[in-house]
Amino acid sequence: MLRNVAAHLELDISGRTNMVFSVAVAQGADLTTERLDIHLDGEPIQPAELVDRHGSRLHQLVSAAGRMTVDYSAEVAGQAQPAPVDELDSVVYLRPSRYCESDSLLPTAQSEFRGLSGFDLLAAVGSWVHDRLQYVPGSSRVTDGAVGTLLARQGVCRDYAHLVIALLRAIDVPARMAAVYAPGLSPMDFHAVAEAFIDGEWHVVDATGLAPRQSLLRISTGRDAADIAFLTNHWANLRLLDLEVLAVVDNLPVDDTTQHVQLR
């Protein structure tokens, strides 16, 4: 499997600001080529690379005011080994988090999924969320969590993932969120999916069904959208003027929804 991914960002920065980008493919991928170019008013900037415990690669820099462009591209050959399991996973990813209010959704989860476990539970939760939400671009706010999504009955990929994660955590299944490049996604963008910890391994749950899980490529991993944002900044304001994402694979798979898939 040969996958090519790219991202282009244009930003208008109002003043000195601390910035962290999360657009690079996570550690462990079999990179054939990779390039990250950041320019401020035409002059190159070299960021520092930080790596978290899941292999998410963050690129941090302090920028002055001006027009910034960020261009990332990578070619990935084959598939990496599934992400290793951290002993903290079963603790961190059972707790409620900012966007995944599993404590509030406990009665709903217990009522809807009583008696289910393992992969039958994953299939049921994914189908339940898919059937109850409508995918509407631009319908959610950055502050909306799983409870708000369920009440609104609509959202985008992050909202679907938040609801899946919250429901799974509510019934004692560790669940987390991953930002991915998603060949086959339309319209193309960064994509977000849930991962559930079953039988000692992390398995993808994508209730949107918008892209085949088999060719997804991990960017970052965390509790919810707060941990996997493609850009965070502090100190000064900025405007995102343009965002373009590309993700293609040499042979786009047909997703068999009965198959158990790990991000690789």
Image (cartoon, rainbow, N blue to C red):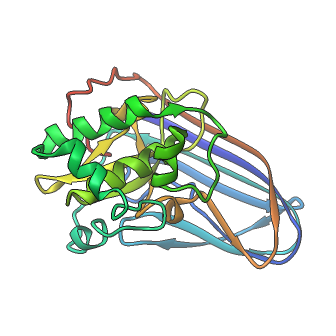
The answer to whether 5 appears left or right of 233 in the picture is left
In the depicted structure, whether residue 113 falls above or below residue 146: above
Q: Looking at the rendering, in which quadrant would you find the N terminus? A: top left
Question: Which one is nearer the viewer's eye here, 152 or 248?
Answer: 152
Question: Which one is nearer the viewer's eye here, 189 or 63?
Answer: 189
Residue 227 spot, x, y in % from top left? 49, 65
Question: Which one is nearer the viewer's eye here, 104 or 125?
Answer: 104
Q: Quadrant of residue 14?
A: bottom right
The answer to whether 109 appears left or right of 39 in the picture is left
Q: Looking at the rendering, in which quadrant would you find the C terminus? A: top left
> At 83% across and 78% down in the image, what residue appears?
16
Number of labels in the image equals: 0
Q: Quadrant of residue 104?
A: bottom left
The answer to whether 61 appears left or right of 186 in the picture is right
Q: Is residue 83 visible?
A: no
Q: Quadrant of residue 239?
A: bottom right
Q: Is residue 229 visible?
A: yes
Residue 225 spot, x, y in % from top left? 51, 58
In the depicted structure, whether residue 230 falls above or below residue 157: below
Residue 74 spot, x, y in % from top left? 53, 45
> At 57% across and 26% down in the image, what residue appears?
186
> At 40% across and 64% down in the image, what residue appears?
223
Residue 30 spot, x, y in % from top left? 37, 48
